[in-house]
Image (cartoon, rainbow, N blue to C red):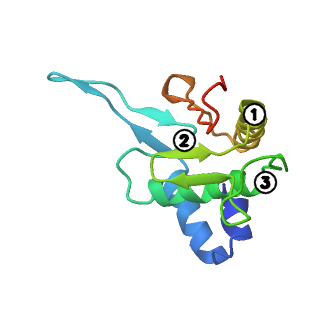
């Protein structure tokens, strides 16, 4: 994560400060009136931390920029095949096969940096001008 921030031009001093916020963190869980013992957070971002969405966006942007998208895919304005926004990614393609290949490339790129695609939240939609297409 820290190398990704540096690659995007975040000053090293700020990266060190972010690292200090994310290392050696602990959490507790409360259920009703019972509070658990403290346990270490070893990976991921802290839920509710104002910095987490920004860091997640850096990681996702890095992964998307590394995807070698299929040249047969549908292009928007001649360039875009992956559209990312705050709660998802749209993958465009001229065929189901192209979308599958681009999705597999994105999953591989995100996995390399520790992100995981939630298969239960993944939705697919195909559209065609051809009424007989399936």
Q: Is residue 134 above or below residue 7?
A: above
Helix, strand or loop under label 2:
loop
Helix, strand or loop under label 1:
helix
The quarter of the picture where the N terminus appears is bottom right
Give me the residue at 63% from left, 74% from top: 10
Q: Is residue 9 above or below residue 32?
A: below
**Mark 1 nearby-residue class (10 Å; few <14, some 14–19, many ≥20):** some
Give residue 90's position: percent from left, percent from top: 58, 45
Give residue 8's position: percent from left, percent from top: 68, 70
Q: Which residue is mark 2?
A: 44
**Mark 3 nearby-residue class (10 Å; few <14, some 14–19, many ≥20):** some
Quote the CA–CA distance across marks 3 and 1.
Answer: 13 Å
Helix, strand or loop under label 3:
helix
Q: Which residue is mark 3?
A: 66
Point out the tag, 3 or 1, that comes first from the N-terminus: 3
Give me the residue at 73% from left, 63% from top: 79
Give me the residue at 61% from left, 76% from top: 13
Q: Which is in the foreground here, disc 3 or disc 2? A: 3
Q: Which residue is mark 1?
A: 104
Q: Quadrant of residue 30?
A: top left
């Amino acid at each position: 994560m820290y190398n990704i921030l540096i690659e995007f031009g975040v000053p090293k001093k700020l990266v060190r400060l972010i690292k200090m916020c994310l290392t050696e963190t602990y959490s507790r869980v409360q259920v009703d009136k019972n509070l658990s013992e403290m346990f270490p957070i070893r990976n991921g971002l802290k839920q509710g931390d104002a910095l987490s969405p920004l860091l997640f966006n850096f990681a996702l942007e890095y992964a998307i920029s590394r995807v070698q998208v299929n040249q047969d895919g549908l292009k928007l304005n001649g360039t875009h095949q992956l559209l990312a926004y705050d709660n998802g990614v749209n993958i465009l393609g001229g065929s189901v096969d192209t979308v599958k290949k681009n999705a597999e490339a994105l999953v591989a790129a995100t996995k390399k940096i520790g992100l995981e695609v939630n298969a239960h939240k993944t939705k697919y939609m195909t559209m065609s001008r051809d009424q007989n297409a399936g």
